[in-house]
């Protein structure tokens, strides 16, 4: 690869890392704020097991896909986010049987607590607060951005 190609790749990593960092900051901000959001009663519309490739193991991973409805000031909303995290709205589990336990616990029609953003009630979660997944996007974004930045700087000195 040419020097220009290395620079372009470093710049792309920097841009991707900054974008991911900004997304991670927003996710963490919502996660922390959600602990103080008002709560309303909602209802499960559907909760099923999904399957997709796992980016880390390159194997298939199972996850839950939740849909629920809730009302705020007479306005009906549909939510999908279980909590704020890396796979927002999707909580990965180790096995299909573990995932099915969650699905069976919340059949359609089950009443649930929904925590919503008072400034934008369309933003909601079933589990308020932050955990390690809430910070992962920010951490990975910072690592990628740092790599791109320092690699780009080191290439400037190679000219």
Image (tube, rainbow, N blue to C red):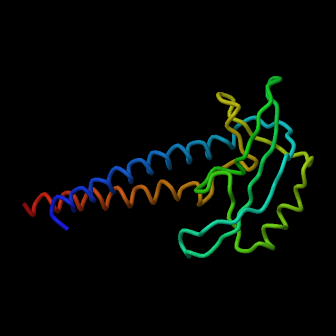
Where residue 128 sits: x, y (%)?
A: 71, 47
31 sits to left or right of 137 = right
The quarter holding residue 100 reads: bottom right
Residue 117's place in the image compared with 26, above or below, is above
Q: Identify the residue at horizontal 76%, vertical 47% (top origin).
A: 126
Residue 118's place in the image compared with 91, above or below, is above
Where residue 18 sits: x, y (%)?
A: 38, 49
Residue 93's place in the image compared with 117, above or below, is below
The quarter holding residue 12 reads: bottom left
153 sits to left or right of 25 = left
Q: Identify the residue at horizontal 63%, vertical 52% (top origin).
A: 88
In the displayed orientation, state which residue is furthest to the left.
159
Q: How many marks?
A: 0
Image quadrant occupied by the N terminus: bottom left
Where residue 103 sits: x, y (%)?
A: 84, 61
94 sits to left or right of 144 = right
Image quadrant occupied by the C terminus: bottom left
Q: Identify the residue at horizontal 31%, vertical 62% (top origin).
A: 147
In the displayed orientation, state which residue is furthest to the top.
73
The quarter holding residue 7 reads: bottom left
Q: Nearer the viewer, residue 86 or 132?
A: 86
Where residue 37 sits: x, y (%)?
A: 71, 37
């Amino acid at each position: 690869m040419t020097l220009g190609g290395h620079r372009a790749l470093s710049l792309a990593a920097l841009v991707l890392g900054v974008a991911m960092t900004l997304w991670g900051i927003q996710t963490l901000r919502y996660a922390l704020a959600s602990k103080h959001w008002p709560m309303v009663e909602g209802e499960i519309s559907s909760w099923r097991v999904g399957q997709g490739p796992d980016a880390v193991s390159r194997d298939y991973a199972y996850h839950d896909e939740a849909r629920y409805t809730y009302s705020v000031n007479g306005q009906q909303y549909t939510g999908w986010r279980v909590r704020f995290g890396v796979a927002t709205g999707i909580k990965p589990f180790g096995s299909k049987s573990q995932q099915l336990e969650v699905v069976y616990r919340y059949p359609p029609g089950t009443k649930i607590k929904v925590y919503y953003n008072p400034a934008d009630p369309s933003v909601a979660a079933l589990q308020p607060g932050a955990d390690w997944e809430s910070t992962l996007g920010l951490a990975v974004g910072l690592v990628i951005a740092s790599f791109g930045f320092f690699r780009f700087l080191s290439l400037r000195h190679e000219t």
